[in-house]
């Protein structure tokens, strides 16, 4: 019987480069490392998104604020917009209903949700959250760590949004709501004090920080958890923030050019609060800060 000619059997060849134990591809060239590329790409994406949003917001704020403020009887002249003379509360009253819708997608692309989760997940014991807004942090609290929660804000409408949102969490943990200024003298003491994106909105961030520190129980374990934003590491970006701050305040109730980290260098603040950890993102504008109150013992030493 005639033998069938042998069929062609292609040899499987590996398509991935061989990696040697020294991290080199088989051809002697160093193998590309995936993790740094992914992390670097992610950071670049978040930063580029942030810068585009700052520039875009600066433009649209200018156009929108004149119309809206005129309609709501608010000041339209930027010369009257200074922290001492301009109360952001009417802006918050106006923004409250649509606030989540307006900033939800910005926060998503900037990775703010992840930062909130990372920060707020550390809250434990008796917790105070100041400048709560619409309650965007509720979902990140760990109910088994929280003994009591108090949520405060100056704006009645923002707090009312927060109260409605809390309905879905009330079986998980108990909460109390109070309409109050962040720099009011605290009447109770807490294990954890949280403030996210509140120091950019209040009239006096120095007094606000001191008040947050005073609200802490005077022990080594108390923590102040802050996620805030302010000036950048870069002058070119600070110039954009500075030149548009008045329009931004009138539109968003927020002084986005504050020297947030500089606050912690002020003598008055240093007497009450010390930083444990800081991370900065978005060219230095977003600050993740874990701080603690200076204990009375340490205050006396100074
Ligand atoms: C940018 S929003 C942040 C809200 C919330 N913390 C968050 O992370 O989404 C700023 C909030 O600070 C509140 N606020 C502004 N000035 C305040 C003050 N002096 N005392 C207490 N809350 C204030 C506003 O009403 C608003 O709800």
Image (tube, helix red, strand yellow):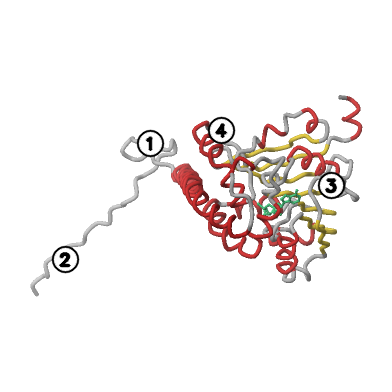
- Mark 1 is surrounded, within 10 Å at the Cα level, by few (under 14), some (14 to 19) or many (20 or more) other residues, namely few
Name the element at disc 2: loop
Q: Which of marks 2 and 3 is in front?
A: 3
Q: Give how far apart the Cα atoms at labels 4 and 2 are.
A: 67 Å
Pointer 4 residue: 233
Tell me: is circle 3 under 8 Å from ligand 1. yes
Pointer 1 residue: 30
Pointer 2 residue: 7
Q: Which of marks 3 and 1 is in front?
A: 3
Q: Give how far apart the Cα atoms at labels 2 and 1 are.
A: 39 Å
Q: Which of marks 3 and 4 is in front?
A: 3
Q: Give how far apart the Cα atoms at labels 3 and 1 are.
A: 59 Å
The answer to whether residue 274 is above or below residue 110 is above
Pointer 3 residue: 184
Number of numbered tags placed on the structure image: 4
Where residue 16 appears, as percent x and y from the top left, is 34, 49
Question: Which numbered disc flags the more N-terminal residue, 1 or 4?
Answer: 1
Out of 224 and 29, give the one closest to the viewer: 224
Q: Which of marks 4 and 2 is in front?
A: 4
Name the element at disc 1: loop
- Mark 3 is surrounded, within 10 Å at the Cα level, by few (under 14), some (14 to 19) or many (20 or more) other residues, namely few
The answer to whether residue 255 is above or below residue 169 is above
Q: Is residue 174 left or right of residue 8?
A: right
The residue depicted at 79 percent of the width and 48 percent of the height is: 182
């Amino acid at each position: 019987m005639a033998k069938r000619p042998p069929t062609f059997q292609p040899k499987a060849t590996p398509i991935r480069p061989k990696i040697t134990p020294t991290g080199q591809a088989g051809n002697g060239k160093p193998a590309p490392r995936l993790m740094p590329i992914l992390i670097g790409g992610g950071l670049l994406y978040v930063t580029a998104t942030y810068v585009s949003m700052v520039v875009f917001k600066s433009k649209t704020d200018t156009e929108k604020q004149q119309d809206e403020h005129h309609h709501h009887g608010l000041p339209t002249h930027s010369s009257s917009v200074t922290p001492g003379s301009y109360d952001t509360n009417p802006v918050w009253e106006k923004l409250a209903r649509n606030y989540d819708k307006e900033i939800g997608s910005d926060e998503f692309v900037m990775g703010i949700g992840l930062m909130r989760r990372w920060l707020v997940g550390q809250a434990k014991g008796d917790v105070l959250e100041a400048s709560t807004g619409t309650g965007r942090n509720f979902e990140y609290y760990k109910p088994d760590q929280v003994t009591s929660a108090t949520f405060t804000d100056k704006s009645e409408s923002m707090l009312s949004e927060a109260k409605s949102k809390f309905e879905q969490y009330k079986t998980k943990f108990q909460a109390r709501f109070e309409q109050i200024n962040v720099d009011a003298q605290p009447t109770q003491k807490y294990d954890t004090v949280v403030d996210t994106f509140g120091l950019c909105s209040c009239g006096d961030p120095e007094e606000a920080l001191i008040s947050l520190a005073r609200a802490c129980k005077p022990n080594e374990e108390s923590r102040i958890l802050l996620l805030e934003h302010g000036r950048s590491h870069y002058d070119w970006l600070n110039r954009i923030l500075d030149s548009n701050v008045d329009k931004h305040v009138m539109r968003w109730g927020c002084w986005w050019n504050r020297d947030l980290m500089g606050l912690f260098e002020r003598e008055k603040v240093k007497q009450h609060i010390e930083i444990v950890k800081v991370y900065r993102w978005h060219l230095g504008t977003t600050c993740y800060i874990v701080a603690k109150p200076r204990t009375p013992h340490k205050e006396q030493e100074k």
